[in-house]
């Protein structure tokens, strides 16, 4: 019987797929790309229409030899790399190395690693999609031209070892411009006023919103005193009570971008870790009697499409475990943004029957947490809307209007399974709160008025999640590039992470300033987004890839020549500290690394001494009374410890509060949650817990 060789990228994938196929199939792993542009040279012949020069990747000779040997023994070869541009290029390069006719039907594609999907794929081979390969080549060649021709300029003008990439430069620009917004931000004062009111059925609070039917903005204490004076003798009366039903619709199943954002918000996972775990779930996990099986569909996707089979399975599960009321009248389909690859599906479980509780025994803690997130989001996306009863009460006091809102869940629908998180700063601002019944025309007793001063706040720094969202909204990069881009800009020292926030380093700001002045296209959001659209056109076969490279390179080469003459040597002076290097006696200097500032000896490379730069906080150590300082774990996570370590080993992951607990006088920490920041006593016998604003 004819023997077939199937080639995938990874051993884990090969192991999973081999269990679904008969003995006539041999499954081998290529370990990713085997052929690429050389690292030691540009590898693009600019004079001959940007012809790329591909070579076998160093260190992959044994793998190529093994695959060639297996190919000779096979009657048929099927290339089963990932179903995206990168996977298509891997298949194309494998075809070249193994002497496969790329016009033959040698390529198979699947979006989940399950037995039905694999058996269906091997029955439907196709030709390699050369248009998709061309789109990948165009991206690779343009990024090589930018990286290998612009980076040496930065080495000569700024600092050795720098790199400039097309997508990473735009990401750093976004972070730099947000930091500039924060620096230039001028806070504006405003005041709020809440009335505590007594109705026949109980008490409630209402917030002042209008004066003489116009939105009221109180900008100073003087204005607030005028309002309080006006209200002093006014009677409070229920002017209007409005009740209505509100439908809350479920959110679509995950794309790569939304998965990374939600994993960051709910699970505190970086995009890099999220994608690593998702890759493991996709490639296959041994789940006992069923063997090794892929638990989720392909995780690099911008589509929210769901297959009819998956919808039918979800319907069956929802009706069986909840009721028919929890399933909508028609199956839900969602529309993807822009040019999403609709041949792909959303990220979903390969079978909703494999519940998180069933898989608990087979998955690691983080694998289970991520799988539960994906499973719940998918299931919720197929369920009925939640029904809320909302109540709005308008209270008049002379020419002023106060408002209180309340809502109760009449029917939970999809909320029985899942509710989407929100970014910090996107929380809804309620207008008062209402927990009692009132009737129109009812007089109310004023129990008190609580005025409060506020100041407008600058826009929040990007987190990894909000940066991914911004990149997606602006059309910068593709699902496969978000996580590596964020990792690269930190590794290169252009961006540092403080807590969950990303902020530019001095080096990052200098480089972006130079690029904005001399290479506007490289850091231009619109140019980068337009290039992504051109790649889509190349993939569709409507635009030649060499034309796109020509259009970019001519003005880029001219800008390179001008910048070489125009830009002088940029000096980045390190700030000298009072700390003395114990190895050589020099004053250590403050440098910026991927996890923030640190101390280093200026005698490098003769002296390689480095130390953490310890930032003191207001709170004293509860054990010994010495100052507490900010420290970092090996992975860059901030924590707080005693400045006398190792003599005193006190540590806390949460920020210690400046004041002691008002109940037991012990230490409090500031904890953040979706409900805001709270002061929490660390004494287990006390358990004091109050919102920060209330405490203040």
Image (tube, helix red, strand yellow):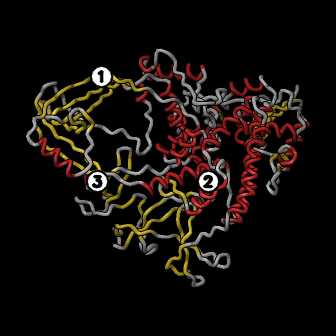
Asked which quadrant contains residue 284, the reply is top right
Whether residue 61 appears in this view of the structure is yes
- Which sits earlier in the primary sequence, circle 1 or circle 3? 1
Q: Position of residue 659 (x, y in %)?
A: 28, 63
Whether residue 349 appears in this view of the structure is no
- Which sits earlier in the primary sequence, circle 3 or circle 2? 2
Q: Is residue 565 left or right of residue 404?
A: right
The 10 Å Cα crowd at callout 2, few under 14, some 14 to 19, many 20 or more, is: some
Q: Report the quarter where the C terminus lies.
A: bottom left
Q: Which residue is mark 1?
A: 244
Gap in angstroms between the C-alphas marked 3 and 2? 53 Å
Q: Which residue is mark 3?
A: 687
Disc 2 on helix, strand or loop? helix
Q: Is residue 577 above or below residue 52?
A: below
Disc 1 on helix, strand or loop? strand
Residue under the image location 21 percent in, 25 percent down: 241
Q: Position of residue 435 (x, y in %)?
A: 22, 33
Q: Identify the disc placed on residue 516.
A: 2
Asked which quadrant contains residue 1, the reply is top right
Q: Is residue 623 above or below residue 386?
A: below
């Amino acid at each position: 019987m004819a023997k077939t060789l199937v080639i995938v990228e990874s051993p884990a994938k090969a192991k999973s797929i081999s269990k679904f196929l008969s003995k006539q199939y041999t499954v081998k792993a290529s370990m990713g790309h085997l052929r690429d542009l050389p690292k030691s040279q540009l590898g693009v012949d600019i004079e001959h229409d940007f012809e790329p020069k591909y070579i076998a990747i160093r260190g992959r000779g044994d793998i190529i030899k093994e695959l060639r040997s297996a190919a000779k023994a096979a009657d048929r070869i099927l290339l089963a790399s990932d179903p995206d541009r990168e996977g298509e290029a891997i298949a194309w390069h494998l075809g070249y190395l193994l002497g496969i006719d790329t016009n033959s039907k040698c390529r198979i594609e699947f979006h989940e690693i399950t037995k039905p999907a694999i058996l269906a794929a091997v029955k439907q081979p196709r030709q390699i999609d050369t248009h998709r390969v061309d789109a990948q080549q165009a991206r690779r060649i343009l990024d090589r031209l930018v990286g290998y021709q612009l980076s040496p300029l930065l080495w000569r003008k700024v600092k050795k070892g720098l790199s400039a990439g097309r997508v990473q430069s735009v990401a750093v620009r976004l972070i730099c411009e947000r930091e500039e917004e924060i620096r230039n931000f001028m806070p504006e004062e405003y005041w709020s006023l809440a009335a505590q009111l007594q109705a026949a059925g109980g008490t409630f609070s209402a917030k002042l919103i209008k004066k003489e039917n116009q939105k009221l903005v109180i900008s100073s204490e003087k204005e607030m005193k005028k309002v309080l004076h006006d209200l002093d003798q006014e009677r409070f009366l229920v002017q209007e009570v409005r009740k209505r039903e509100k439908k809350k619709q479920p959110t679509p199943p995950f794309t790569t971008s939304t998965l990374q954002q939600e994993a960051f918000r709910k699970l505190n996972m970086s995009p890099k870790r999220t994608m690593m775990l998702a890759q493991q779930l996709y490639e296959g996990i041994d789940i006992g009697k069923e063997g090794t099986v892929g638990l989720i569909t392909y995780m690099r996707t911008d589509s929210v499409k769901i297959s009819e089979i998956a919808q039918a399975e979800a319907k069956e599960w929802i009706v069986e475990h909840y009721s028919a009321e929890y399933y909508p009248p028609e199956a839900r389909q969602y529309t993807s943004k822009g040019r999403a690859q609709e041949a792909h599906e959303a990220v979903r479980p390969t079978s909703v029957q494999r519940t998180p509780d069933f898989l608990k025994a087979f998955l690691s803690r983080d694998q289970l947490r991520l799988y539960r997130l994906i499973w719940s989001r998918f299931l919720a996306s197929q369920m009925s809307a939640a029904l809320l009863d909302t109540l709005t009460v308008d209270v008049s006091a002379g020419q002023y209007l106060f408002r209180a809102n309340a809502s109760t869940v009449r029917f939970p629908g999809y909320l029985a399974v899942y509710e989407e998180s929100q970014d910090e700063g996107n929380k809804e601002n309620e207008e008062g709160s209402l927990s009692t019944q009132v009737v129109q025309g009812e007089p109310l007793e004023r129990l008190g008025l609580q005025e409060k001063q506020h100041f407008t706040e600058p826009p929040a720094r990007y987190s990894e999640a909000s940066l991914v969202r911004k990149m997606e909204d602006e059309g910068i990069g593709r699902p496969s590039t978000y996580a590596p881009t964020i990792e690269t800009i930190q590794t290169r020292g252009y961006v540092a992470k403080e807590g969950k926030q990303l902020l530019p380093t001095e080096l990052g700001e200098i480089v972006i300033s130079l690029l904005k002045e001399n290479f506007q296209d490289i850091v231009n959001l619109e140019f980068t987004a337009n290039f992504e659209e051109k790649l889509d056109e190349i993939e569709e076969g409507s635009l030649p890839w060499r034309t796109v490279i020509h259009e970019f390179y001519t003005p880029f080469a001219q800008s390179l020549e001008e910048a070489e003459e125009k830009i002088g040597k940029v000096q980045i002076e390190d700030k000298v500290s009072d700390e003395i290097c114990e190895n050589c006696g020099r004053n250590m200097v403050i440098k910026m690394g991927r996890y923030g500032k640190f101390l280093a000896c200026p005698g490098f490379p003769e002296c390689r001494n480095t130390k953490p730069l310890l930032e003191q906080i207001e709170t004293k150590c509860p054990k010994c009374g010495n100052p507490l300082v900010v420290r970092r774990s090996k992975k860059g996570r901030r924590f707080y410890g005693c400045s006398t370590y190792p003599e005193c080993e006190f540590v806390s992951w949460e920020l210690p509060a400046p004041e002691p607990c008002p109940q037991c006088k012990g230490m409090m920490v500031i904890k953040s949650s979706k409900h805001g920041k709270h002061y929490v006593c660390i004494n287990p016998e006390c358990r004091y817990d109050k919102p920060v604003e209330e405490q203040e």
